[in-house]
Amino acid sequence: MNQFGTKMKQKYKEYNGQEPITTLAREKYPDDLSKRTFKLYSD
């Protein structure tokens, strides 16, 4: 992942299971996922 991130000019942080990860949409994983319901759509 480090090589891929460098190539794509992106930084990746390993999930340690202790601290939540914040997405670009400002959602926090896994906290926000446990509070929502998701619907799957298909064309």
Image (spheres, rainbow, N blue to C red):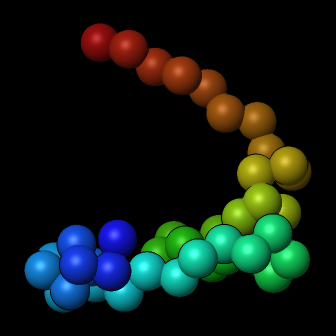
Q: Residue at x 33, y 80 (%)?
A: 2
Asked if residue 41 lies left or right of residue 2, the reply is right
Q: Position of residue 17 (x, y in %)?
A: 81, 69
In front: 24, or 16? 16
Q: Position of residue 31 (x, y in %)?
A: 83, 63
Asked if residue 17 lies left or right of residue 9, the reply is right
In front: 40, or 2? 2
**Residue at the limit of the structure toward the top, as seen here:** 43
Vertical order, 11 against 40 (above or below): below
Vertical order, 14 against 42 (above or below): below
Vertical order, 24 against 34 (above or below): below
Q: Residue at x 76, y 51 (%)?
A: 33
Asked if residue 23 lies left or right of residue 10, the reply is right
Q: Residue at x 77, y 60 (%)?
A: 30
- In the picture, the quarter occupied by the C terminus is top left
Count every numbered label the image shows and give the total.
0
Q: Position of residue 38 (x, y in %)?
A: 67, 33
Q: Is residue 31 visible?
A: yes
